[in-house]
Image: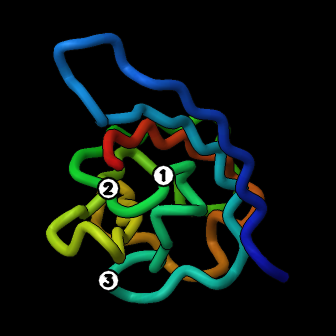
Amino acid sequence: MSLTITTSFQTLPPPLGNEYVSQASITLDSSYAAGGIALTPAQLGQKVSCSFGLVNLRTAAGSGTIVNGVLDCSTPTAPKLKLNTATGEIAAASNSGAIVDVICWGQ
């Protein structure tokens, strides 16, 4: 099974210049790896890189309930989606089918 990702994006008004904001809805599968899901800027609706992101849980599924998430943009061309339960990082198959929304700023 692979992740299902749908995106939409728009340019931010000046003075932010060439920055874009995009929204990606990601339906999780059993591919979650320790350290997060490796994504590309294109999967998040960006052309080159991601500089900042916000994560919001839309629906929960499985036995491990996601309580928070972060888009790690420390490598702007290879962002990672990191998700946690109340006790730590989610397990691979425990949240299959959950949907998270990621809002990403970048170029």
Q: Which mark is residue 31?
A: none
Q: Quadrant of the N terminus?
A: bottom right
Which three-letter amino acid code belongs to the residue tagged 2? Cys
Q: Nearer the viewer, residue 44 or 2?
A: 44
Under circle 2, the secondary element is strand
Find disc 2 in the rendering and name its residue.
50
Colouring convention used in this rendered image of the protein: rainbow
Report the residue at 74% width, 47% height from top: 6
Q: Which residue is mark 1?
A: 46
Residue that carries the numbered disc 3 in the rendered image: 35
Residue furthest out toward the right:
1
How far apart, in angstroms, are the residues tagged by discs 3 and 2? Answer: 18 Å
Q: Is there CB contact under 8 Å for labels 3 and 2?
A: no
Q: Nearer the viewer, residue 100 or 20?
A: 20
Where disc 1 sits, the SS reads: loop
Q: Position of residue 90 (x, y in %)?
A: 44, 70
Q: Quarter-wise, where is residue 23 in the image?
A: top right
